[in-house]
Image: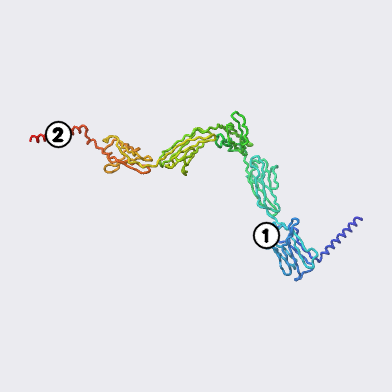
Amino acid sequence: MKIIKVLTMEGRISTLTLLCLVLSGVGALQVNIPQEVYEHARGDNITLPCSFTPKAPLNGSKLVVISWSAEATQAGAQETLILTYYSPVAITDIKPLYEGRVSLDVDVAKGRANLKLSSITLADNKVFECRVQIPGDDEGKPADTARLVVLVAPSTPICKIQGKVEYGENINLTCVSEEGLPQPTYKWESRDFRNMPHVADPRTTDKGGILSLYQISRDTSGHYICMSANKIRSATCNITLSVDPPIAPSTPICKIQGKVEYGENINLTCVSEEGLPQPTYKWESRDFRNMPHVPNPRTTDKGGILSLYQISRDTSGHYTCTSSNKIRSATCNITLSVDPPIAPSTPICKIQGKVEYGQNINLTCVSEEGLPQPTYKWESRDFRNMPHVPNPRTTDKGGILSLYQISRDISGHYTCTSSNKIRSATCNITLSVDPPIAPSTPICKIQGKVEYGQNINLTCVSEKGSPQPTYKWESRDFKNMPHGADPRTTDKGGILSLYDISTDTSGYFICTSSNKIRSATCNITLSVMPPSKNTDPTAGIIGGVVAALIVLIIVICCCCKKNTS
């Protein structure tokens, strides 16, 4: 009973104390913001309410100063004055930082001093204070505070795959929103391609936006949706997984990239056209005695490409590539035989084409032996031993020097160098290109008898001319009409061959000799008599003798008569 009395006494004391405190506030200034925390979305236009009750009713002339300020939530942050309102003059002083964004909904008589903020941002995450100052009324509660929390809706999350989407692999599906306040929470859901929810796998975990999938298979395939959400709203992103069944590697194809020649660098490539998961490749090699090759620190084996540097006879041997995945492996082989180097043999230089003014010619250069394959280079000098002026049309490729429209300037000594890593060898050609000479007047001749039924040649030759003249025969009959074509007639190299000549062959024959400088002509007239008008040569002679004797007898007789007289 004593204890109960003591407790009763203490209760009475506490009640009395509380009553005294309440009574002390009566008749003093009271400022009040209804809530301690206000939550609004970024970009909203908001109102922070503030009411005040003075000690005594205010008349219209009483000075009242109302101010709003803000203080960042970090420790030690400075307070920033937003605005100050003066009554009864009704002047509001807004600080430049908040100019155009804030206003005061004020009614002094009713004790209202609400702060209006437009288009709030994350920078407005602060503690706001409403303070009222009335001269002579400085007791009670002159100010109150509230915290503004600016909420940000989650940005559209970004979905990604970590790992290889291959049969039997472990992968993570990640989901992240770059913005969101409060911090978004994430949840993954999935359906197969028939739009049925996936059967839950006890090993699968979904934590912090990371969905971990283990030993994926065809059953894992489907559509995966991640939802990012907070108090404002939610947003989603999607990933589609397609896990194909495993495929054994196809037999790989082995190839050589580069020249298998002493001192060269080459690659041996190995590729399987099929294989899931993607096959891995490994090269192994042995020499011709079936002994493993001594490792070369420069050799690399990466992604099915075996890179061999400065190959030599020691590189020769059998090379095997193994293509493998989780299903099985397959191989392909290459045999390399690297011969020792051979110096180039003395090259053979030749001229292709006619060395005549205005012609195109090639100078060729070939070594019959050489390993590695020799390379060729032409150099030239004129007869004064000066290098030739380069001609942009001249080409030097693979031992062939091509010269176009040659002239006297091309004349000189040409040297070809054939070389490889062992040594070099040379050969030479001297070119002498004479200046062009117009064809001399050609000489026309007849070869054969110009008699009915005979075969004859008409020849045409210019003794001078460079480049070498070409010849062309043309003919007309005695009526100046072109001869009819005879399929047996040939015109080649200045020789016109005529067969079984007849009266139709008779006429004028003109030969034209020409080169790039000019042309010249010569002529022949053929007159072929028909057989009926041709007489035997012997009969002609006898007739002539008889006629001569008759004339002689007549002369003698005349002389005798004269002497007798």
Residue 553 in sight here: yes
- Return the x and y of residue 420 as percentages of the image width and height: 53, 35
Q: Which colour scheme is used?
A: rainbow
- Residue 516 shown left or right of residue 380 in the figure: left
- Residue 329 shown left or right of residue 419 in the figure: right
- Return the x and y of residue 363 as percentages of the image width and height: 45, 38
Which three-letter amino acid code belongs to the residue tagged 1?
Answer: Ser
Residue at 74 percent of width and 55 percent of height: 74
The quadrant of the picture occupied by the N terminus is: bottom right
Label annotation for residue 552: 2
- Return the x and y of residue 429 as percentages of the image width and height: 45, 37
Above-or-below relation of 183 to 112: above
Residue behind mark 1? 119
The image quadrant that residue 350 belongs to is top left
| Other-residue count near label 2 (Cα within 10 Å), few / some / many at <14 / 14–19 / ≥20 | few
* Separation of residues labelled 2 and 1 (CA atoms): 155 Å
**Mark toward the start of the polypeptide (2 vs 1):** 1
Residue at 53 percent of width and 32 percent of height: 342
